[in-house]
Amino acid sequence: MINQLRRALRSDLESPVEARSFGSGWISGVGALALSVVASGVILSAHFPDLLAAQQFRTLYEQSWFDLLTQGIMLSSFLLACISLVLRQNRILGISAIVLVFMASLIGSMPTTHDSTASTAIISLDWFVLNLLMTGIVFIPLEIFFGRLRDQPLFRSEWREDLLYFLISSLLVQTLTYLSLWPSNTIVAHTDWSAFRHAVGSQPVWLQFIEIMLLTDFIQYWFHRAFHRIPWLWRFHAVHHSAQKMDWLAGSRMHIVEIIGLRSVTVIPMMTFGYQEIAIQAYLLLVYLYSTYLHANIRFNVEWLKPFIVTPRFHHWHHGIEEEAIDINFAIHFPLFDRLFGTYYMPSHEWPGGYGIKGHPVPNGYLRQMAYPFQKSQR
């Protein structure tokens, strides 16, 4: 029964273009379902903060306006679901949203369980909800109105795998942060760099921000290039390159081993060198949004910018399936590093004809992709 409902929901989300037109009830149904997921996630996090809530968000749930906000989200979801039920012959989207809103209401009526002595949660459900909501609000409209491939649907092939990557990386954000902070704090505690750290941290914040961008981009360039050139590292990075469609969600497809390695080589230097937390947090926000932007299905041909900053077309060529797209364009922010080290490739006004790896050796499915690098017979 559950599998039938899941298949029916997936089928309606992936409806053909003619079944997703304005007035068909598909847009209101998807909106209702998205808001019901947001409401459910936020209410679960608020009622079980020691298990599901990120530390920095817990005080928000004690504010008087929080209940009004969640009630407004649930009401909006319910109204959109009703519109979808009226307009759409297939009612699975509207019914699913109403069921989730009803369940969220039941959870909201339960007493909150909170233990002040409990340890910090390692599952950040509220961060996933906020992350998905904010990036979706920004990038989905951009792809709809400025998409390079106008016929690529929102729920394209492999969207479920990439959404699962997005979910898991968001849920584990606090664990991944700890894995980066622990080595940094250990290095600081066992080294006498106080004068150097003071000099770095006393600089203007804007200058620290620029230095962090240059430092991390140089490190990421060689880290990224190593994952292409060293065969056993490529097995992990191949998971990221296995995406055959590019959009704002595709950038989240990364093997957990690569995520930990990338965070280590970038966050540890920032912390140990003494950069202020505000500069580090500003950079982390920028690099997250910028990475999403580079993978997005967006055509912004601002040619005069391409010598100075990385653009979506620059990074799309890195993911291209053509022979000339192999081992090029490793930089994340500045093409200067690719120019200096001979890996720059940007044909004028051209985009790659496809994405992925020749022969598409990486299997579909999150668990199989996690296991792929450890299989013996990999090229």
Image (cartoon, grey):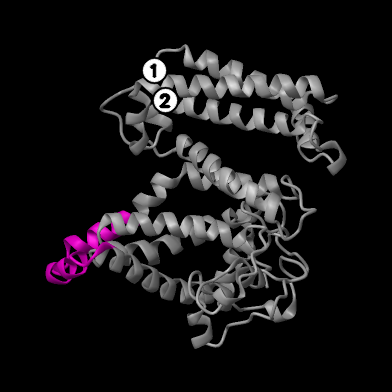
Q: Does the magenta stretch include residue 64?
A: no
Numbered badge on residue 203: none
> Camera-side residue: 201 or 76?
76
Quadrant housing the N terminus: top right
Numbered badge on residue 112: 1
Residue drawn 38% across and 65% down? 266
Q: Is residue 359 above or below residue 93?
A: below
Q: Is residue 95 at least partly visible in the picture?
A: no
Q: In this view, does 359 lie above or below 284?
A: below
> In the rendered image, which residue does mark 2 sit on?
46
Q: What element carries label 1?
A: loop
Q: Is mark 2 on a helix, strand or loop?
A: helix
Tell me where the magenta segment starts and ends, as one range.
Answer: 180-205
| Prevailing SS of the magenta stretch | helix
Residue 253: % across, % down: 60, 55
Residue drawn 51% across and 19% down? 71
Q: In this view, does 94 lie above or below 53?
A: above
Q: Alpha carbon of mark 2 to alpha carbon of mark 1: how far?
A: 7 Å
CB within 8 Å, label 2 to label 1: yes
Amino acid type at image mark 2: Ala
Q: Is residue 87 at least partly visible in the picture?
A: yes
